[in-house]
Structures are given as structure tokens and as C-alpha cells.
Image (tube, helix red, strand yellow):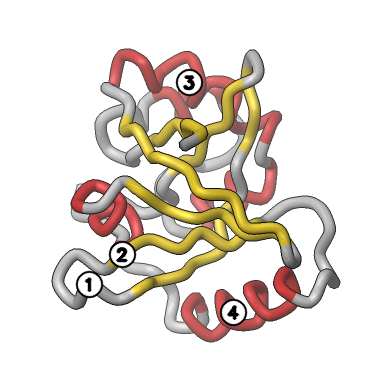
Amino acid sequence: MANPKPPWWLKPMNKVLMAATRIGLIKDGPVVLTVTGRTSGKPRSTPITPFEVDGKRYVVGGFPGADWVRNARAHPEAVMTRGKVREPVRMVELSAEEARPLLRQFPVLVPTGVSFMRNAGLVTGPHPDESEALAGRCAIFRFDNV
């Protein structure tokens, strides 16, 4: 199966989400992740929805080959921002085996992420087996404090 392409509206919607998050309109849910561009070296921001399991925070890359995922692989030092609170983090990509149990929990912990992945054709719904099958295809990162 070829990698799905993001919908045309994703970049404009991301800009709206980031602005709403920055000014405090969105209190829960997405945060703004800023990573260094792998070729430009400039800061690149995108909204993400982290989730927590056993006191650790994670995020799933919703599209295989997403730019922010490739940037995080090249430059794992990042900043998560919610409102005016900026938190430096180090992103650690998990192996497919490490990701499997977390991906099984993803449909319950991040239902909006499931909708996004369903629209992209990656899953048909909030089924733990389908989400787990994305291990090795969709990146999953742990956020470590720096």
C-alpha cells in the first residue's frame, strides 16, 4: 500500500489549530511541536496530540513519511508549546515492537487521531488490531524531558 498523502486542507487547518493553541482557545488536546527542519535548519511547527501511558508521553505520526516525523528523526531536540508554556523535549523513536502495545491503546487515548487516520485510509475505525498493525509504518515517539 502506498503512503497516503495528506489532504489539501491539512496545512491551512494546522495553521488555524496552532494559532488557537497559542492564544489559549484550546486548553486540552493538541500542542504545538516545533522541530528543526532537516534541510533548512529553520524551526518547523505542527500541531500534535500527545498521549500518556504509565507517566510517559508519546505521539503517533499520522502519516507515513510526514515532514515533521522526518525532521524529528534528523533533529530529535524539540519544543512543545501549549499557550505560553514552552517545554524543551527530546524525541525518541520507538521500534515497531516497542510501539505495538501503545498503538493498541491509541484508539481510546486519541480518538481524534483515529478519525484522522481513518480519513487517510490507514485504518477503518477505532480497532486496536488495526492500530497495532501500523507499527513500523507510522512512527511513534516518546518525549523525554531535557
Q: What kind of element bears circle 4?
A: helix
Please state which of the two labelled residues, at mark 3 or mark 4, is closer to the viewer: 4
How far apart marks 4 and 2 lie (CA) works out to: 21 Å
How far apart marks 3 and 4 lie (CA) works out to: 29 Å
| Label pair 2/1, CB-CB below 8 angstroms | yes
Mark 3 is on which residue type?
Asp
Q: Nearer the viewer, residue 4 or 90?
A: 90
- Categorize mark 1 by other alpha carbons within 10 Å: few (<14), some (14-19), many (20+): few
How far apart marks 2 and 3 lie (CA) works out to: 33 Å
Q: Which residue is mark 4?
A: 13
- Residue at the far front: name it: 146
- As drawn, 9 above or below 82: below
Identify the image quadrant of residue 35.
bottom left
How far apart marks 1 and 3 lie (CA) works out to: 38 Å
Residue beneath the point at 30% across and 51% down: 72
Q: Which residue is mark 3?
A: 129
For marks 1 and 3, the one nearer the N-term is 1
Q: Which residue is mark 2?
A: 36
